[in-house]
Image: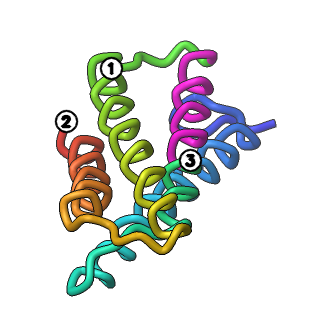
Amino acid sequence: MGVTKLGYPRSMTFLLNLLLFLHIVGVAIIVGTWIYTMKRPTVTVAQFWAAVLMLLTGVGLVGIHEMSGHEINYAKIGVKIVILLIVLVAAFIGMRKTRRGEPVSTGLAHAVGGMALINAAVAVFW
């Protein structure tokens, strides 16, 4: 079994890449839907489930890095989890309002998309 540049076995590298890909897909769904509905802001069911996907894949990524002994920036992970929990709660509230046929406030819709975008920026620039 070969080892990659990061010191992981090839099978583990595939799992890490898969989790990272799904994590990015979650961000893309949230931010893409936010931009698409910008003229009439709302929150969709897909945005909520994308936030759940981001949480699960993010925990998986951190767990794999932790188990392999790689250095983890816990302050960064803590900030990202707090931001993601804000996205998750806002998306849940918005999703419930959408399902009930109630209007979703502009601030709530922008909180979901904007905070997800900020979370991506924290991942890239920190």
Q: Is residue 32 left or right of residue 3?
A: left
Using a 10 Å C-alpha cutoff, classify the residue at mark 3 as few (fewer than 14 neighbours), some (14 to 19) or many (20 or more). Answer: many
Callout 1: SS: loop
- Label 3 amino acid? Val
- How far is mark 3 from mark 1, CA to CA? 22 Å
Q: Is residue 15 magenta?
A: no
Query: Does label 2 or label 3 sit earlier along the sequence?
Result: 3
Answer whether labels 1 and 2 touch (C-beta < 8 Å): yes
CA–CA distance in space, label 2 to label 3 = 23 Å
Is 8 placed left or right of 117 in the picture?
right
The residue identified by callout 3 is 52
Q: Is residue 7 above or below residue 44?
A: above
Q: Residues within 10 Å of mark 1 (few under 14, many from 20)?
A: few
Residue 63's spot in the image, x, y percent? 59, 23
Which colour assignment does the render follow?
rainbow
- The boundaries of the magenta stretch are 54-67
Q: Position of residue 123 (x, y in %)?
A: 29, 43
Left or right of 83 in this view: 46: right
Residue drawn at point x = 58 percent, y = 28 percent: 7
Q: Which residue is mark 2?
A: 126
Under mark 1, the amino acid is Asn
Viewer-nearest residue: 72 or 88: 88
Which of the labelled discs sits on residue 39, or is there none?
Answer: none
Mark 1 = which residue? 73
